[in-house]
Image: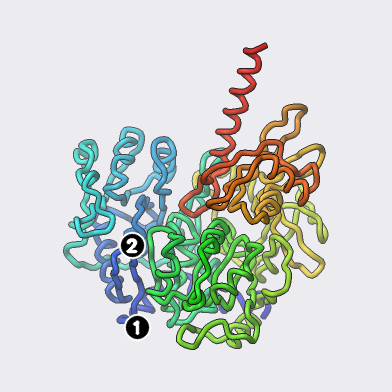
Amino acid sequence: MNAQALFAMMVQQGDVVTDRFRDAVRHHPDQTFIRYGEEGRDLSFAAFEAEVATLAAALQEMGLEPDDRVSVFTRNSWIATLAMFAVWEAGAVYAPVNFNYAGRLLAYQLNDTAPRVLITDADLALAVAAVLDEVRLTNIVVHRPLPSDHDHDPAKAALPPALLARPGLHDLAELMRTPRRHRPVTRGAADIANIIYTSGTTGPAKGVVQPFRWINQYTFKSRAFLTPEDTIYCDLPLYHVGGAMFLVAKACWTGCAVSLWDKFSPTRFWDRVRAHRASNAVLLDVMVPWLMSADPRADDRDNTMMRVHMQPLPARHHEVAQRFGIPFSTAGFGQTESGNGFVALIDQFGETEAKRPEFRVGHDRATVLEIARRRGVMVVDGAEPLAKGFMGRPSPLLEAAVLDADDNVLGPDEAGQLAFRPRFPHLLLKSYFNKPDATIKTFSNLWFHTGDAVRRTEDDVYYFIDRMGGFFRVRGENVSSYQVEDLLNTHPDIRATAALPVPAEEGEEEDCAVFIQLVEGCSMTEAELRSFAASVMPRYMTPRHVRFVEALPVTPTNKIEKYKLKQSLLAELAAARAAAETGR
């Protein structure tokens, strides 16, 4: 299918997620939509729509106008989902905040977003109260859990006095007590749906302004494999696009259910999947070793998981699929700014049945393969070796290229920056919110620059190498942190590795440092680690600094927080240098 036909199909399916949500309410009102596992609460499309309408009406009564922004700062995924749909229905912009933020980070984002309304938790009220003098907030809505709620904390039940004294304070339960209807607001493909902030470890975070068509583009190919019988499993936070859009919002186009959880649990993951008959999920790279470290069980395949998306694709993807009976995996490239520029389908079992009939959900294998063919999705055999960083071929909706530092297009097997040009309007971000200079720089020479290093082959298959910042120069050679981690992680006693650059002791280049988390119960000396490294990587790639840690610091989406590791190591090295100087 060519790009024009694919775009026409995508637009025909509906650009605006709330339009598709209302279609689902009309066509199958009694079908289950949200299954909030933390409290055993199931809501049909109609029941959820009634709750959304009530909150949307309450927001409009506060003076919320179309295109106003609403910041959502909550750990509770049910509240986040309710708020997201209510904000959209009210015609406003969903602007979630990382629930780990406090102090300067929180104040910065609230000031940058300038929301008309902030929706938050009693659990986070202290963090909000601490920045009240630094930010301007007209309306604050607080979710105060009841004693019967799973997130009730008696120690945090009382709101801080500074918050109680604030005009415009609203109790969410009171707002939801009386059902009512909101004023409908018509939204189109170009209208702003979200402002999602990218993580900022080297500078202020940037708010990515996403139109409604961005959500359509981001979910378009992956949702083709879903049916109303499916259940999407979501344990990712809803301040990132992976949880909010790729998992929750996507369900509106197919009318399927969403199994909603507040956070990932390695010990309860499969029990949750079985309880809700979940069939689709996202497995981030850090999740895989946690799941695989559990002792194998005879019933590992007795689950309904039919497809998992893995980004980046782990080396053990086929082993994971074979152990847990997952017929298909998908890989690709998803980004807050550019959506879903790549997707590939990995057939993990071929003609062999992965599951007993009672555990199969949705499309059969032949149908899945035919859908992939019609949508132009690359299909590969999971049993065959895949080179590291495999992403597949570009979406026909976007022109992709590998660029050098001067934006010249590079040839096959040359490493450079991945860049996109949309072939149709409103497929990518509109801008970085309040940051015109950053927007112009990112779109220089009419290319959107992703900030990711990739390579492509003669047959237009792309492979991820690293974040551009993940390259560092050691002894005249370019070293990729991704490659260092991948090689060290092949050791059976290593659970996870974080590789990062630190200033070299001599010259202007850098040294490689690694932080190693061992498998529980295992031990290793630095000498043993260095011996292993020497056996699997070139000398210039071997780490100068080795540190063993009990656990690597991670974000709620299980991404390793390398900047924290770097800060601690730099402080340690500085102290050592100071001590050496003192001793002279």
Residue drawn at the location 35% of the way across and 52% of the way down: 74
Looking at the rendered image, the quarter that the N terminus falls into is bottom right
Amino acid at pointer 2: Trp
Instruction: Give 423 or 249, whichever is nearer the viewer.
Output: 249
> Which structural element holds mark 2?
helix
Q: Specify whether 380 is left or right of 520.
A: right
* Sequence-wise first label, 1 or 2: 1
Instruction: Give 85 or 91, whichever is nearer the viewer.
Output: 85
Residue occupied by mark 1: 28
x and y, in percent, of residue 574 in the image:
61, 24
Q: Specify whether 503 is left or right of 289.
A: right
Looking at the rendered image, the quarter that the C terminus falls into is top right
Q: Which of the 4 image quadrants contains residue 187? A: bottom left
Can residue 259 be seen from the camera position used here? yes
> Which structural element holds mark 1?
loop
**Residue 78's mark?**
2
What is the basis of the colouring in this image? Answer: rainbow
Amino acid at pointer 1: His
Q: Specify whether 550 is left or right of 144.
A: right
x and y, in percent, of residue 168 in the image:
23, 45
Q: Does 199 sit above or below residue 503? A: below
